[in-house]
Amino acid sequence: MKKLSMLLISLSLFVAHVAAAAGWQSYDAAAYGYSMLIPPGTQMVEKEWPLGWGGMSGIHDGVEIIGVAKLGAQETAAEIEKFGVLVTGIPGSAWTVVDSGSGHGWTWYKTVKAQQGGKLVYGGYGVGPRGSYLILVKTTAADYAQYRDDYEDWYHSVKLN
């Protein structure tokens, strides 16, 4: 029993170390009303997007983080999906809704994953008190598979303020 306890403690410390090694840090886009984790060293840059959207994006080690908002506008799911296709270049037919609901500041949200070739997009879109949002990571399918836990931690960190 003592060996099992020591093994479990060692395993817990290893898992905590691996999680800390990922080292994603908190990022607050206060002007746009959202916060999330981003990989360390990511330089987020403000960008105006088509159709009245604006927000932040940054690339680090081939992973692109995109957080855009249409403040004041309560867009429909179809309108946000259409914009998502424009931003990602992945057709709507390749998008899969993997979850939906409300919470963390969202009035409603949909969690999506889209893949075309080796490119994979994961994140969510929806509406909150300040407007409509599309918040995604763009990476490769291989990177997502290798670092899935980091991407899940990122996804669960996204909050509307």
Image: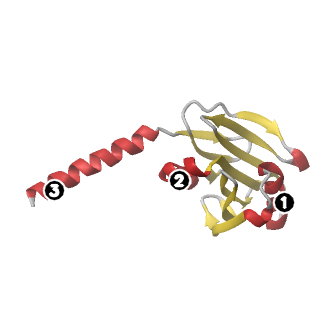
Q: Residues within 10 Å of mark 3 (few under 14, many from 20)?
A: few
Q: Residues within 10 Å of mark 1 (few under 14, many from 20)?
A: few
Is 97 situated left or right of 131 in this image?
A: left
Q: Which residue is mark 2?
A: 145
Q: Residue furthest front?
A: 117
Residue at 54% across, 51% down: 151
The answer to whether 130 is drawn above or below residue 49 in the figure is below
Question: Which numbered disc, 3 or 1, marks the residue that appears first in the sequence?
Answer: 3
Is 68 situated left or right of 10 in this image?
A: right
State the SS at label 3.
helix
Q: Which residue is mark 1?
A: 82
Is 57 situated left or right of 145 in this image?
A: right
State the SS at label 2.
helix
Between residues 74 and 8, which one lies in front from this camera angle?
A: 8
**Where, by quadrant of the figure, is residue 38 drawn?**
top right
Residue at 60% across, 59% down: 104
Q: Residues within 10 Å of mark 2 (few under 14, many from 20)?
A: few
Q: Position of residue 87 (x, y in %)?
A: 80, 49
Q: Position of residue 69 (x, y in %)?
A: 77, 49
As measured in the structure, the alpha-carbon distance from the residue carrying label 3 to the one carrying label 2 is 31 Å
Q: Position of residue 12 (x, y in %)?
A: 28, 50
**Where, by quadrant of the figure, is residue 37 drawn?**
top right
Residue type, label 2? Ala
Residue type, label 3? Ser
Residue at 70% across, 47% down: 33
Question: Which numbered disc, 2 or 1, marks the residue that appears first in the sequence?
Answer: 1
Residue 5, numbered label = 3
